[in-house]
Image: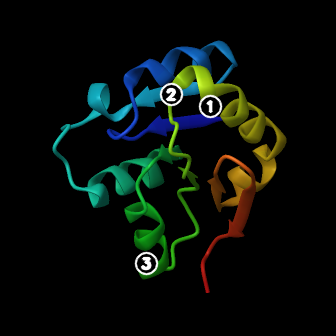
Amino acid sequence: MKVLIDMNLSPQWVKPLTESGFEVLHWFTTGNPGAPDSEIFEFARLNEYTIITHDMDFTQLLALTGAENPSVILIRSKNIMIKSFSEKLIQTLNENREVILDGAILVIDDDKMRIRILPLK
């Protein structure tokens, strides 16, 4: 699975995700760090990446466009430190691989995970 880490998450997320078998890019090394979310969204859509973010704007773009992709993993935890959250994120990605590849929003917080299938209606 190909994942694109948004600017609001540390580039240090690349290592544990790569070590877990994911093809990982961080936007900082891929595009203009000041690019609008719409540019990141379009890059992910065209190149079949799932966006991992701490930013609600990507879910809003999916709602506005009615797009079927890219999938978005929205981390809603207050603690987004890699040590605290990487295991949960990796487990969520592995357990939900098919639904992510088909197009979905996964919202992960400290206690639960919610899935919305794309396109949003």
Local packing at callout 3 (Cα closer than 10 Å; few below 14, some 14-19, many 20+) is few
At 25% from the left and 36% from the top, the residue drawn is 31
Q: Examine the image and state in which quarter residue 60 appears.
A: bottom left
User: Which of the two labelled residues, at mark 3 and mark 2, occupies the earlier sequence position?
Assistant: 3
Which callout, 3 or 2, points to the residue nearer the camera? 2
What residue did someone put label 3 on? 65
Local packing at callout 1 (Cα closer than 10 Å; few below 14, some 14-19, many 20+) is some
Gap in angstroms between the C-alphas marked 3 and 2: 31 Å
User: Which of the two labelled residues, at mark 3 and mark 1, occupies the earlier sequence position?
Assistant: 3
Under circle 2, the secondary element is loop
Q: Is residue 39 left or right of residue 60?
A: left
Please name whichever residue, 35 or 102, is drawn nearer the observer in this view of the structure: 35
Across and down, in percent, residue 102 comes to: 71, 58
What residue did someone put label 2 on? 81
Q: Disc 2 residue type?
A: Met
Q: Which of the labelled discs sits on residue 85, or is there none?
A: 1
Across and down, in percent, residue 119 comes to: 61, 75
At 49% from the left and 24% from the top, the residue drawn is 13
Are the residues at dot 2 and dot 1 in contact (C-beta closer than 8 Å)?
yes
Q: Which of the labelled discs sits on residue 12, or is there none?
A: none
Q: Examine the image and state in which quarter residue 12 appears.
A: top left
